Structures are given as C-alpha cells and as structure tokens.
C-alpha cells in the first residue's frame, strides 16, 4: 500500500499539465471541518430516518420531524470553517487548473474557502438559506435557527404564512435541471475527474464519474470507504482527504 505521500505524488502526476480538472465532493471532505457525514457510524442517517419531499409537503408531523434534525445539525454547520482539503481545491483554481467544482454538500465551505461561485455547482442546494415554498421569500438559515431555538416547531413565512424549507434538495425532490446539465457538460469535457469524500450512493450525482470515464477522462476516487465505482477508476485512495490533497499541492 503506497504511503500518503506516494499517493499524493500519484495524484499530482495525474493533474500536472492540465487546466481541465473537475472536482466532485461529498460530505467526506467536510468531516475534517467537524461536519459529520451521513452514512458513517454516528452520521445523521444512523439516528434519523430521512423525510421524503412528498411527506414534507403532505404532513405536519413529517415537517416537525424534518425540522428536529435540521435544528440539531445546524450547530455543526454554523461552527465549521474550511479545512486543508477545501484550501487545496482553492489552490488548484489559483493555478488555473480547475475547470469546475461539483459538490453534493450543502455547507457552503467551498465558497467560504475562496473558490469562485461560477465554478461551483451545488447539486443538492445550500443550507445557508430557507425559502418560502409559497411566495419565494428567502430567509438566512441562521435567522430560522433562532425561531427554532425559541420554540417554533415548524417555521412559517412571515409574509404569507406559507411552508418553508431550507434551499436544499430533499430525497424525492428533483435536482435543479440547469445545475445538473452544467455538471454533465463539465464531466464530458474534462481531462481529470476526482471524487473526494463521497460514498457514491446518491444518484444521479454518483454516476457523474462514470460519465467522465466514458468521455475519456482520467478518474480518481479519494474516499475512506469503498464505493460502487472503485473498479471503474484509474486511481483510488482511502487516506484522509485533507492530508492527500494538501500534500498533492506540494508535488504539483
Ligand atoms: P456520505 O455520507 O454518503 O459518504 C461520505 C464518504 O466520505 C464516506 O464514504 C466516508 O468513507 C468518506 N469520508 C469521510 N471522511 C473522510 C475523510 N476525512 N477523508 C476521506 N474520505 C472521508 O456522503 P455523500 O456521498 O456526500 O452523500 C451524502 C448526502 O448528504 C449528500 O447528498 C449531501 O448533500 C448531504 N450531506 C452534506 C453534508 C455537508 O454539506 N457537509 C454533510 C452530510 C450530508
């Protein structure tokens, strides 16, 4: 098994000389910032059953359950700051090597680290805002947290009394068409595609690495646990994302 340093060298080798790198991130890049992922032991889905979008719309009880885990998870999001992995991706952009940054994360840490907004494709939306599903009024998520902590169980819009939901994509909700189309176009036109910290279990996002591979790109996976796509790719590492990515920058 190659050392962390050797794996970082291999990754730098794959990236060197191209300005068409597409990075695809999942919850695993943010665990080193203190935000738990969903499927590892202790993750949110080991404690709560996810609420489907249709249930959220149909049932007050489902909305109560949904806001309980949103309320509980907020402290981790609010306290988190970008880690070495996020910063390494900013460095790729500074060096003119990053074509696109596709993320399943809703924590906003890529933007906070300094990646440019037009390069970031947030497939699953963002936790930084809460939208009224009736009139579209948008509230900062931190403001809604204050309501929840003051005892509100299901926040309703101050303008129209409509149901509100964080600007994230729930299970059973369609991904934003334009964001997904742009992500696919980038996968089809990149030289190198790297998955970082995703179990690659949520479709259609997980299949983007197969699209990049079919289009002829070098494809790598940097993820602690196995994924269903491991056999398909050119490079694979189970090391800590932050350690490999920061060392990789040194070898570029
Ligand atoms: P996941 O929880 O299914 O998988 C995360 C993967 O990251 C795991 O396979 C784990 O082995 C790996 N991992 C964890 N820490 C790592 C580290 N330090 N280095 C390398 N690998 C590490 O996550 P997913 O595939 O992104 O799917 C979860 C869904 O939940 C996403 O759609 C996302 O929207 C959402 N989510 C987002 C956040 C966030 O925004 N930070 C957090 C939890 C969940």
Image (cartoon, rainbow, N blue to C red):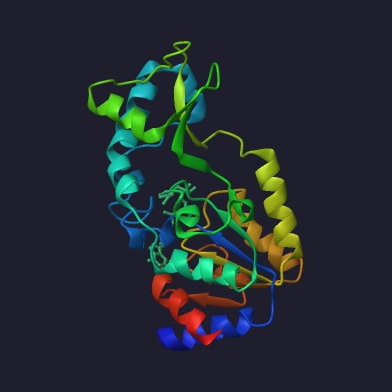
Please identify the quadrant where the N terminus is shown. bottom left
Residue 79 visible to an observer of this rendering: yes
Q: Residue furthest top?
A: 160
Q: Is residue 79 above or below residue 13?
A: above
Quarter residue 154 falls in: top left
Name the foreground residue: 37 vs 163: 163
In x, y percent, where is residue 246? 44, 76
The residue that appears at 46% across and 64% down in the rendered structure is: 86
* Front-lying residue, 7 or 58: 7
Residue 240 can be seen, yes or no: no
Quadrant of the picture in which ligand 1 is shown? bottom left
Residue at x 56% of width, y 82% of height = 12
Q: For this view, does 164 lie left or right of residue 176?
A: left
Q: Quadrant of the C terminus?
A: bottom right
Q: Residue at x 58, y 56 (%)?
A: 116
Nearest the eye: 112 or 226: 112
User: Where does residue 198 sit, x and y in percent of width and height?
Assistant: 48, 59
Count the marks: how many? 0
Q: Quadrant of residue 149?
A: top left
Which of the 4 image quarters holds residue 66? Answer: top left
Residue 182 rendering spot, x and y as whole percentages: 71, 50
């Amino acid at each position: 098994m190659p050392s962390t340093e050797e794996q970082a060298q291999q990754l730098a080798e794959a990236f060197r000389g191209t300005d068409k790198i597409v990075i695809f991130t999942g919850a695993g890049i943010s665990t080193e910032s203190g935000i738990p992922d969903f499927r590892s032991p202790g993750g949110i889905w080991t404690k709560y059953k996810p609420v489907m979008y249709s249930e959220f719309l149909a049932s007050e009880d489902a909305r109560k359950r949904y806001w309980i885990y949103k309320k509980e998870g907020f402290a981790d999001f609010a306290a988190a700051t970008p880690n070495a992995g996020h910063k390494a991706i900013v460095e790729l952009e500074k060096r003119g090597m990053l074509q696109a940054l596709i993320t399943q994360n809703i924590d906003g840490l890529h933007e906070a680290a300094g990646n440019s907004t037009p390069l970031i494709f947030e497939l699953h939306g963002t936790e930084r805002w809460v939208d009224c599903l009736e009139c579209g009024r948008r509230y900062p998520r931190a403001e809604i947290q204050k309501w929840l902590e003051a005892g509100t169980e299901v926040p309703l819009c101050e303008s129209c009394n409509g149901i509100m939901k964080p600007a994230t994509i729930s299970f059973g909700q369609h991904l934003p068409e334009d964001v997904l189309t742009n992500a696919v176009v980038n996968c089809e036109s990149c030289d190198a595609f790297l998955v970082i910290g995703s179990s690659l279990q949520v479709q259609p996002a997980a299949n983007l690495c197969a699209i990049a591979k079919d289009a002829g790109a070098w494809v790598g996976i940097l993820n602690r646990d196995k994924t269903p796509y491991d056999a398909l790719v050119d490079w694979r590492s189970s090391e800590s994302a932050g350690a490999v990515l920061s060392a990789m920058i040194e070898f570029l």
